[in-house]
Image (cartoon, helix red, strand yellow):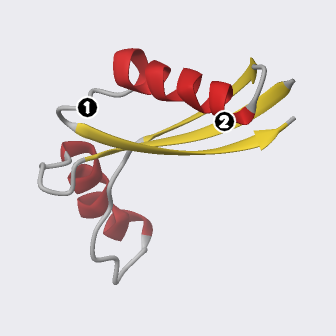
Amino acid sequence: MKYIANIKIMPHKELLDPQGKTVLKNLSNIEVDQVNDVRIGKFIQMTLEADSEADASAKVEHSCKKLLANVIMETYEYELTPA
């Protein structure tokens, strides 16, 4: 069966996010005010084949831990839906 995993990867809240700080600092240049914080991460959509939802979840977990996310500096979460 086919599944779609929508994966969101973000830096740990405790860590400085230089990209987010740069965007936050420059939002006033395009007349966007009253923004308190910006954090920049990654969104990944993966379509995969698996025998069950548990199998698909295991594949996504393995992919995130070993390749997609740097678990020392980033957190990840995902939603899995049948395709």
Q: Quadrant of residue 83?
A: top right
Q: CA distance from mark 2 to mark 1?
A: 18 Å
Looking at this view, is 16 or 35 the one in front?
16
Q: Position of residue 48 (x, y in %)?
A: 74, 20
Q: Position of residue 57 (x, y in %)?
A: 60, 32
Where does label 1 land, which residue? 71
Where does label 2 land, which residue? 5
**Residue sitting at x 42%, y 74%:** 32
* Mark 2 nearby-residue class (10 Å; few <14, some 14–19, many ≥20): many
**Residue sitting at x 34%, y 84%:** 34
Q: Residue furthest bottom?
A: 34
Of callouts 2 and 1, the N-terminal one: 2
**Residue sitting at x 76%, y 28%:** 52
Looking at this view, is 23 or 28 the one in front?
23
Dot 2: what SS? strand
Q: Amino acid at mark 1?
A: Val
